[in-house]
Image (spheres, rainbow, N blue to C red):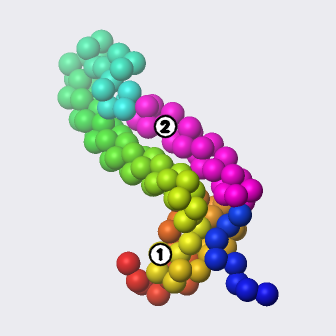
Amino acid sequence: MAEKTRYTDEELNEFRDIILDKLNKAKVEYEELRAAITNADGNDVTDTSPTFKVLEEGASTLSKEEAGRLAQRQMKFIQNLQSALIRIENKTYGICRETGKLIPKERLRAVPHATLSIEAKNSGVK
């Protein structure tokens, strides 16, 4: 029996559902982070005493910086998921970009935007 070179349309549909679910959740989280950065909820230090105002502003700045980093990371995750959807449409999803072999389903279920098999990833090839 010949080695399988790509996933079937049915398998690709299963992965598409997994990716779409993760994509929707990631977009919600991204919007929450953006709201934290822009202070959309209106919480600030205007109603605190002057003694704590400086401390609060410092903590707020750090929180916004952290939220900014998390938002950037979340946006990259969203872009990776969107790229995975394109690979599904092209029927190249699940093929290791280094070895050309199929990435195991278990890995794709855990990391649906993976483009490398564990072996390729561990070999340090980038």
Give above or below for 97 relative to 20. below
In the drawing, what numbered circle is on residue 57? none
Say which of 18 and 47 sits in front. 18
Q: Quadrant of the C terminus?
A: bottom left
For the residues labelled 1 and 2, the Cα–Cα distance comes to: 27 Å
The residue beneath circle 1 is: 97
- Residue 51 can be seen, yes or no: yes
Residue extent of the magenta highlight: 9-33
At 24% from the left and 29% from the top, the residue drawn is 57
Instruction: Say which amino acid is labelled 1.
Output: Arg
Q: Nearer the viewer, residue 63 or 13?
A: 13
Quadrant where the image shows the N terminus:
bottom right
Quick check: is 14 in the magenta stretch? Answer: yes
**Residue 76 spot, x, y in % from top left:** 39, 51
Q: Residue at x 44, y 37 (%)?
A: 30
Residue 125 occupies quadrant: bottom left
Q: Using the image, determine if residue 24 lies above or below residue 120.
A: above
Q: Secondary structure at mark 2?
A: helix
Say which residue label 2 marks.
27
Three-letter code, disc 2: Lys
Q: Residue furthest right?
A: 1
**Residue at x 36%, y 20% (from the top left corner):** 40
Residue at image point 26% right, 14% down: 46
Q: Magenta stretch containing residue 85, yes or no? A: no
